[in-house]
Image (cartoon, rainbow, N blue to C red):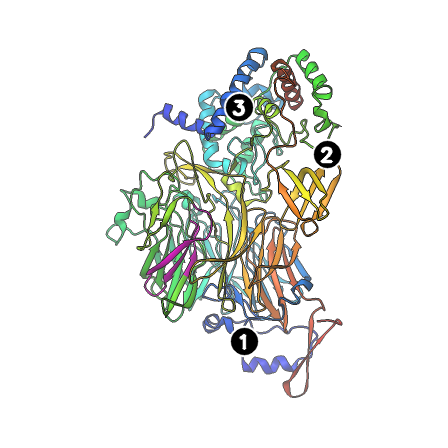
Amino acid sequence: MKTVNQLRKDNDFALRGDADRKRRVWFTLSIAVSLQLGISLSHARARNLYPGAAQDQTTRSSDSGPEGIQRGRKLFDANCSGCHGPEGRGGSRGPDLAGGHFKHGDSDSAVFATITKGLPDTGMPAFRLRDEEVWDVISFLRSRRETGQADPLKVEEGKNLFFGRGNCSRCHMVNGQGGRLGPDLSSTDSPMTQNYLAHAIRDPGSSLPVDKGAFAGIGADRLKKYAKVTLIYPDGRRITGVRLNEDSFSVQLMDQEERIHLVLKQDVKQVVHEHGSMMPAYDEKMLSDAELENLVVFVMNLKSK
Amino acid sequence: MIEKSWGSIVLCILSLGVVWAEGNVSPDRLVHSRSEPENWLTYSGTYDGWRYSTLTEIDVNNVHELVLQWAFQTGSTERFQATPLVADGIMYVALPNNGAVALDAQTGRSLWHYARTLPSDIPTCCGHVSRGVALSGNKVYMATLDGHLIALDSKTGNLVFDREIDDYRKGYSFNLAPLVVKNNVLIGPSGAEFGIRGYVDAFDTETGRRNWRFYTIPARGEPNHQTWEGDSWIHGGAATWLTGSYDPELNLVYWTTSNPGPANFGEHREGDNLYSCSVVALDADTGQLKWHFQFTPHDLHDWDANQIPVLVDLDIGGRRRKLLLDANRNGFFYVLDRTTGQFLFAKPYGHQTWAREIGADGRPVELPGSRPTAEGVDVCPGLFGVTNWMSPSYSPQTELFYVAAREECGRYFSSDQAFENGHYWFGGHTTAREDAWGALRALDPRTGQLRWEFRYASPPMAGVLSTAGALVFSADMEGNFMAFDARSGQNLWHVQTGAAIVASPMTYSVNGKQFVAIASQSALFVFGLSGGPVRVVSGPEGTREKKTSGNRR
């Protein structure tokens, strides 16, 4: 049997991966460290994050400290990640839970009920866990969210970059303003962590897919989002864009002018699945580390609303 | 087949539709089900597991004219995995949450509906699904998620008996279509991920009493018990959650088993873990084990061997042999002698990185670095294998074996997890790689060689149907239901059903009009050639004339 420390080490394997990912983790850690030094974020205790928590009828039977979170992670891996993804960021069978948005109620008691009673006809089963285990899972979920008070100056600088020199709004929309080629960064459906965001801005071409839990494989929606695709027509014409959907017979994409193309594969000569992203990589010449930090703070601050 | 006494009564009645025929499904009808292609009396169509129909009305020349004839909506968003059965103009469908309906197979109108209240705390890995019902005599059988076997009256849906078989709280749950063999209804539980001990049970079709049980994990003192270290056999898994096949001449039932538990961690269950990841041949009358063959000894990748055994007689090595074809989850296509279980050969039919080959003794030659580790190791195929429970098909017309193949690798993690009743017990977890795809493949069963493939955008979970119209039907996770030329793989027809398809198609006919059915999410879609229902009008001296209501057939 393993010691508690060994088990804790085991739990960290959800964060590790192959050598490439390790390198990227170190890369982003170095950015994250400098971000952390600058950003005055505090990891609030989960209990204080939600206004509804004060009115909870259900009483926690275990505390939500680091040990509870680690236990919760292990339970989450074993029971939940198959549908909700290894970091709770969503699989095809289960929605994202890491962003703090719980469709069926985000209070402690609501999440407790969802886990223990399930949601009939949605595919979410009832889980037979002890009360303290459920609370550990909830602690783990709460810990996935990073929030806190953001420096308003950095938010303002970031916003100026986003809509100005950074040109992010060319492709990204926030709160209804901006472009359509990339994901809506104010959407609660696809929340991100600071590390992921910083890395995605510096190196969007590297694949940072959320490793989907295995049981996601038997849901629909398997295709990678925002894949870059080029259509080659019989007359030689080429159109490159972001794929909206694809199957054996058709492909739907949005080109860089935000025109939607609805195409039958029988009408094109070839469909090329490109490597990399439509998003350019913002290196230090384009965006200094300080500017990157401001941008990240701005985007993360959107999500805490 | 309508017996003579009923036949004359039917023919005397003037009607514009189908008269309710007897619908009594005898053991003899089941043995000879291939001779009544207008019906689909058992899960795979016939006992040999071919999922093949001799109907020819729909063929390569007219399949592109298929149109929707009717749809039935279940009202549930649980996965719809069922194969409908048809007997004498009535279709029987198992619904999610263990409901069931009987429909007029020509129009889709329901005749009766059975609903079941399930407990809210059923531990189940994969949804409140049922892959189908079974028919015998005048009864419809369903095995339920809460561990029961029920029989319904086929004319009314009234409950005839309801027997509790096992405790669902311990993970024993039934989601398979039962198999009726003579006077027995055969079922087996799922739940290896909850540490059950698997079995195949045979219940009397009339009384529901158990006639025999075969445990897929031998107890102390029984042969092969020593392939389990210590007490690991008690929660060893080897679940039996997919319908088997049957050879009436040999009187052998072929059933397949799931992985040993815990799936990804083997250090407390050293040994081959028989009869997990195997096919077992059981005497149909006694349940006695005649032979077994294990595809993946001491499995660590959750590669359940619950695939349909396909029984074909072919010339191999210069003589006619009774074969069992198995496209296994572990990525190899196996050919065995189904009389003795002798291993003949195996060949990969999809990408796999875990074995150099299957040796002459039928055992895999494992490649180093394929076992799960705490840090995670990349292996192909992934958790769901190169194929899974979805039905393959064999066509005697093309002599090809058709299988839905998944090209998806996985990263496997192991961890030492203690068993706890009712809790998921994997001993690790697996993630799926995003660069996955799939294909419908046609294999030459004599060699395992690929004859053709049709590529899908993602790994499929739907089964295959082949017909004497030289057609193959299958479906993808993007919702397309498709027909292909069975000889070349050319796609001849497709329709978008609007949701991922995780069921296997079937076909039947009513008054000479052929229908093809597929379940997709919350609807059953039934297609046929245009022209409306066929009218049967009685003529002089018991003859019948067919008139269509439309201008075209």
Residue corresponding to mark 3:
A143
Answer few, some or many: residues within 10 Å of disc 3's Cα (few below 14, many 20 plus, some between 14 and 19).
Answer: many
Q: Is residue B160 visible?
A: no
Q: Most extreme residue toward the bottom, as rendered?
A: B541
Labels 2 and 3: the sequence-earlier one: 3
Indicate the secondary structure of the residue bearing disc 1.
loop
Point out residue B400 in the picture as x, y percentages from the top left corner. 49, 63
Indicate the secondary structure of the residue bearing disc 3.
helix
**Residue at mark 2: chain:** A
Q: Which residues are magenta?
A: B325-352
Residue corresponding to mark 2:
A256
Residue corresponding to mark 1:
B1
Kind of residue at disc 2:
Gln
Kind of residue at disc 3:
Ser
User: Where is the C terminus of chain B found, in terms of image quarters?
Assistant: bottom right
Q: Nearer the viewer, mark 2 or mark 3?
A: 2
* Alpha carbons under labels 1 and 2: distance apart: 63 Å
